[in-house]
Amino acid sequence: MTKPDMISCATALARLWAFIDGELEPASEAEVQAHLHVCRRCYPQFDFQHAYFQAMQRLASRPEPAGLRSATLSRIHAAG
């Protein structure tokens, strides 16, 4: 649901990752935020993508298990 003066769902969803990453200009960020505040169709997509982004950040901050890289590369070469 959008109001006549708001951006469309397609525009809001196209800007979603940039919004989550904090890469939008202030005016565009405000447009997406206003849209998400009222749109029941788009907010669940934002909620999912934001949760995914946060999970990836948590995983990226954890140290890589010892031997993971070499074991993965060995399996790739063996399968190739």
Image (cartoon, rainbow, N blue to C red):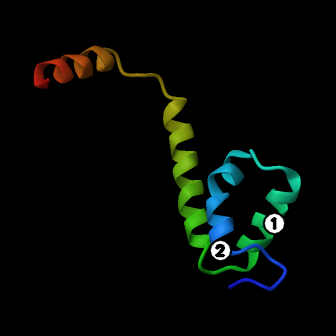
The image quadrant that residue 14 belongs to is bottom right
Label located before the other in sequence (1 or 2): 2
Q: Is residue 6 above or below residue 59?
A: below
Q: How far across and how far down the image is residue 7, in percent?
A: 76, 73
Counting other residues with Cα less than 10 Å from the Cα at mark 1, is it few (<14), some (14-19), or many (20 or more)? some
Residue beneath label 2, please? 9
Tell me which residue sits at (74%, 80%) in the image: 38
Decide which of 61, 13 is in the foreground and name it: 13
Q: Image point 51% across, 31% down: which residue? A: 60
Q: How many marks?
A: 2
What kind of element bears circle 2? helix
* SS of the residue under disc 1: helix
* Amino acid of disc 1: Glu
Q: CA distance from mark 1 to mark 2?
A: 11 Å
Q: Quadrant of the C terminus?
A: top left
| Callout 2 amino acid | Cys
Residue at label 1?
31
| Rendered view: 45 above or below 62 | below
Say which quadrant the N terminus sits in: bottom right
**Rendered image: mark on residue 4:** none
Seen from the viewer's position, the closer of residues 22 and 2 is: 2
Residue at 49% x, 28% y is: 62
Out of 71 and 21, give the one closest to the viewer.
Answer: 21
